[in-house]
Image (cartoon, helix red, strand yellow):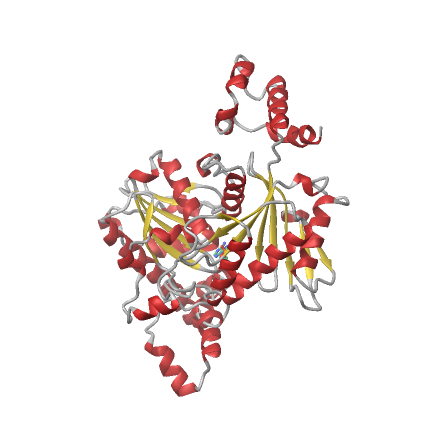
């Protein structure tokens, strides 16, 4: 009964999703034949089907930071976000809980001494009171956790058990803040919903197939053996989504094409994906490498680090802070890590804001160029995340002067915002595609698939219309 009620709202999914249940549906196909898609009768047939299988399609996606806990409850059947929110300043006196979507966001001030307290508040608001979207914990099929570092252990997402937890813990040395925070999120869920399966989705796993010549650094080999110093790559969940969507938009098989995917947000990375397999990416041993970012320097001459430590007496920790939190757009402009503020200042003629724009766009251009060289071309260039999706000025600067390479931006299409679209000119040999990324969807999908022991039952190609 519960399952029937639960499934009723979820049955208005369009045809491709039904194909995902084909292993179950030979009887259903017969039952449904002749029933118009979307008709009331079809919905009832579908609801009965779902309830028979007892499928609960809500996945809770959790992204725990050192003092934050972001969450989304996603209905995997139609990629609908049922609820989302963020607990901030967890562990401090000023902790906050923001819950809601867009203009319906509520902010609650309340004590959140640790991640378990934050998780308790989240589960409470999801299941009780006026904002409730589920009846109880049984309405959550599984929890998907975003984990930053999977090292060389995890080539794909994994069902969380004691062994997986211990490996995530072992890897904390490589990503101290992130992996420890993720473990706090996992432990909180384990304490509060011990019977709900959980899946770890790693930022790094997409890049585990990088060729060795690409992931090794030219420093003595022993440091790779001793400390695992190599390129790991990050933002993998986003790049994976962008690849699948781009292939769907192009109407091509991902395994037959070359793509350059650019995740340009507060953190930035570019990946060359050759026939479905990443062959290089700009982030490296840590997410500090590669492009200039909001507050991160990206790649610099490593001798600058030792020079500054020498001359300014900085400790490794202070040096880390400078390169991770005080550099990038913020460090150069002296204004903000937010490109919108830098844009205002640069439009008003501020020389350092103009310089920040030029440095940022030049670096993106350079790395796209590297990817082009590595793959001897590309079938599309994909832009995503805050800057890639929204900033027409930055896109204009990135693609300026590439007509001889057959890469031509359409100035009018470039001005549009907010949805999947091709922004290159019809004359461009290489399509430039803007795709709003959806990491939460990928985490929810991996989680659902792993828990149900199926692979790729809900391809991202079905959902790209956010
Ligand atoms: P993300 O990390 O993907 O949330 O991206 C955040 C960054 O996107 C912000 O810090 C801004 O720099 C940038 N951004 C978002 N919207 C715009 C916009 N309309 N114009 C320029 N930059 C934007």
Q: Could you tell me residue 86's position as x and y percent?
A: 63, 55
- In the rendered view of the protein, which quadrant contains the N terminus? top right
Q: In this view, does 126 lie above or below 169?
A: above
Q: Could you tell me residue 442's position as x and y percent?
A: 49, 44
Q: Is residue 73 left or right of residue 251?
A: right
Q: Is residue 131 visible?
A: no
- Residue 142 image-quadrant placement: top right
Residue 233 or residue 391, whichever sits in front? 233
- Residue 182 image-quadrant placement: bottom right
Residue 267 or residue 51, whichever sits in front? 51
Q: Residue at x 52, y 59 (%)?
A: 166
For this orientation, the residue located farthest to the right is 129
- Residue 459 image-quadrant placement: top left
For this orientation, the residue located farthest to the front is 163
Q: Could you tell me residue 389's position as x and y percent?
A: 45, 50
Q: Is residue 122 left or right of residue 15?
A: right
Badge count = 0
Residue 404 or residue 138, whichever sits in front? 138
Q: Which residue is drawn at 44% across and 65% down?
A: 346
């Amino acid at each position: 009964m519960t399952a029937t009620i639960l499934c009723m709202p979820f049955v208005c999914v369009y045809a491709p999703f039904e194909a995902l249940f084909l292993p179950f549906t030979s009887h259903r196909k017969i039952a449904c034949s002749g029933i118009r898609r979307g008709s009331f009768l079809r919905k009832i047939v579908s609801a009965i089907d779902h309830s028979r299988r007892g499928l609960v399609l809500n996945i809770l996606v959790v992204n725990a930071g050192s003092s934050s806990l972001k969450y989304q409850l996603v209905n995997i059947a139609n990629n609908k976000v049922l609820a989302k929110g963020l607990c901030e300043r967890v562990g401090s006196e000023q902790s906050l809980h923001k819950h809601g979507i867009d203009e319906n966001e509520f902010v609650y001030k309340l004590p959140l001494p640790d991640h378990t307290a934050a998780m308790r508040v989240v589960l409470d608001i999801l299941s009780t009171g006026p904002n409730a979207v589920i009846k109880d914990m049984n309405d959550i099929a599984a929890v998907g956790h975003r984990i930053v570092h999977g090292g060389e252990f995890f080539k794909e997402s994994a069902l969380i058990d004691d062994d997986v937890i211990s490996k995530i813990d072992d890897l904390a040395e490589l990503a101290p803040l992130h992996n420890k925070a993720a473990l706090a999120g996992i432990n909180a869920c384990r304490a509060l919903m011990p019977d709900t399966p959980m899946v770890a989705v790693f930022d790094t796993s997409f890049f585990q197939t990088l060729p060795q010549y690409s992931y090794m650094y030219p420093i003595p080999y022993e440091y790779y053996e001793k400390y695992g110093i190599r390129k790991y790559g990050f933002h993998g969940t986003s790049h994976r989504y962008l690849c699948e969507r781009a292939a769907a938009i192009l109407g091509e098989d991902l395994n037959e094409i070359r793509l350059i995917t650019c995740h340009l947000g507060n953190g930035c990375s570019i990946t060359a994906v050759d026939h479905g397999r990443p062959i290089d990416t700009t982030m490296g041993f840590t997410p500090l490498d590669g492009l200039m970012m909001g507050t991160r320097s990206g790649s610099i001459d490593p001798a600058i680090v030792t020079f500054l430590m020498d001359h300014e007496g900085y400790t490794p920790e202070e040096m880390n802070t400078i390169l991770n939190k005080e550099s990038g757009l913020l460090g150069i402009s002296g204004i903000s890590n937010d490109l919108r503020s830098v844009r205002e200042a640069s439009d008003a003629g501020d020389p350092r804001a103009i310089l920040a724009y030029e440095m940022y766009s030049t670096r993106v251009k350079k790395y796209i160029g590297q990817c082009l060289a590595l793959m001897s071309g590309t079938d599309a260039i994909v832009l995503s995340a805050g800057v890639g999706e929204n900033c027409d000025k930055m896109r204009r600067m990135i693609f300026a002067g590439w007509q001889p390479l057959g890469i031509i931006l359409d100035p009018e299409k470039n001005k549009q915002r907010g949805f999947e679209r091709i922004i290159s000119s019809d004359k461009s040999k290489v399509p430039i595609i803007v795709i709003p990324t959806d990491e939460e969807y990928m985490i929810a999908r991996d989680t659902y698939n792993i828990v149900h022991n199926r692979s790729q039952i809900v391809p991202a190609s079905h959902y790209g219309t956010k």
